[in-house]
Image: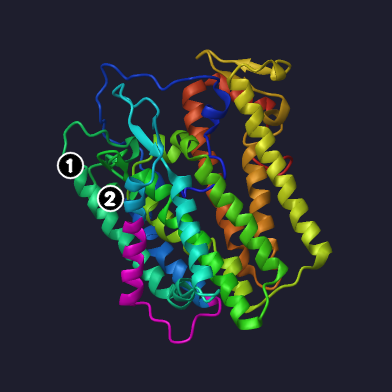
Amino acid sequence: MSAVETSEPLLDQSEVLSAGETPPVEVGRELNPKTTNEDFSGVPGALGITIGLPTLIYVLYYALDAVPGAKAIDLCALEGYLLWFFGLVGLFYIVPGRVVDGTTLRDGTHLKYKMNSLNCFLVVLAVLIARGFITHGELPELVFVADHLLGLITASIGFSFVLAFFVYLKSFGNPKTILAYGGNTGKPIFDWFIGRELNPRIGMFDIKLFCELRPGMFLWAIINAAEAHLQYRKFGYISDSMILANVFQFIYIIDSAILEAKNLTMIDVTTDGFGFMLAFGDLALVPFTYTLQTRFLAQHPVNLGWLGIAGVVALKAIGYYIFRSSNSEKNAFRSGDPSVAHLKYIETKSGSKLLISGWWGITRHINYFGDWLMSIAWCAVTGFNTPITYYYSLYFAILLIHRESRDEAKCSEKYGDDWKEYKRIVRWKIIPYLY
């Protein structure tokens, strides 16, 4: 899951703290060693997640006010989803964008990536705005999305399965294909789930990065707009809470498109294979669970008032400040900026430097804390009417804790005793004085 998932790519702790490192070319080592450590408890965990998460999406759909007469198997919705997905593929090829190199792969090569996510998103928005003028605000496309949401859920889940099978089978086509360290167990179910090939692509079309930032992320914005449109059609106005939810999440989405190149350093892109887990997360989980707030508000408008707006915005601002300031400090440290020359650090035996003051002396993942506070602000726009709309904040906490645990294991192996000393100095993992 791109979705992956923050307004700046989630970097593991070794990337956060190791200044200026470039992945070494692993000369003399087997290109695709067998996976010995199976994440998610191996095949049983993979099967549980494969069944459990799609079920969760349907449960959340029906827990909110479902559209009367909506069908889970909806051929119109399937046609609409396929048109959406492959229309965005077409835009990838048509819309201009700069070409950049990805990180160094373990065979010493670089993949090239076309960066045009922002341009494609602007094209989608321009078409939608034009349709608004042409249809005098009727926007039948948004009405279609709201009315066929259940069918679109089924279509996206089904397409995730198909895509996962496609990339799994494709991974056997070339003996020089670089496989993910975590997806080469030889167990078909697990490798299909976790992702066998590291960077499945067709020419310059990188399937993993495309899914990470486009079909699900853009659809997220479209669904939010459709729910605001539905609220207006039903009640004759758009509530302040609906506006805040759309604005907060729109900023997040467009920020991800603007920072597309930075996603090339995400653990999803550099380390994880692309299988059902990421395909489902990107295409289904993100657009159909991250929109719970606007879906609730479309049926149950919440009027926050100026005091409520101020409280939610303040929480969002605090989270954003922590997130951006900590990442800026990290980036300045990695680049040797004199403005952070006063920061204290541990010099490790590997030559890396582990920060122990400033933001990174408070917790080992202080940027995660800021990101989580922003997620609470997203949910708080719905008030305290139902716990369902706080799903995103709970899910995001689980995601961050899981990433933190993966990072702890990686850094413990990489830094050894230096990591033990670092943990002694910086005690807290994510939340100061709590976790």
The residue labelled by disc 2 is 192
**Local crowd at mark 1 within 10 Å, few (<14), some, or many (≥20)?**
few
Query: Toward which corner of the image does residue 176 lie, by quadrant?
Result: top left
How far separated are the C-alphas under marks 2 and 1? 12 Å
Looking at the picture, how far across and down is residue 217, in whole percent?
Answer: 47, 54
Task: Check disc 1 and give the amino acid type.
Answer: Phe
Q: Is residue 319 above or below residue 390?
A: above
Q: Is residue 84 left or right of residue 235?
A: left
| Residue 88: quarter of image | bottom left
The local crowd at label 2, few if under 14, some if 14 to 19, many if 20 or more residues have their Cα within 10 Å, is many
Query: Residue visible at 29% across and 53% down?
Result: 164
Name the side, left or right, on which 55 lies relative to 316.
Answer: left
Whether 84 is among the magenta residues is: yes
Amino acid at pointer 2: Trp
**Image position of 127 with respect to 9: above or below:** below
Q: Which residue was labeled with disc 1?
A: 172
What x and y, as percent, mark residue 173? 15, 41
Q: Is residue 52 above or below residue 399?
A: below
As for residue 388 lying within the magenta part, the answer is no
> Which residues are drawn in magenta?
63-87
Q: What quarter of the picture does the C terminus occupy?
A: top right
Residue at the spot 54% in from the left edge and 17% down from the top edge: 352
**Horizontal and vertical percent position of residue 163:** 28, 55
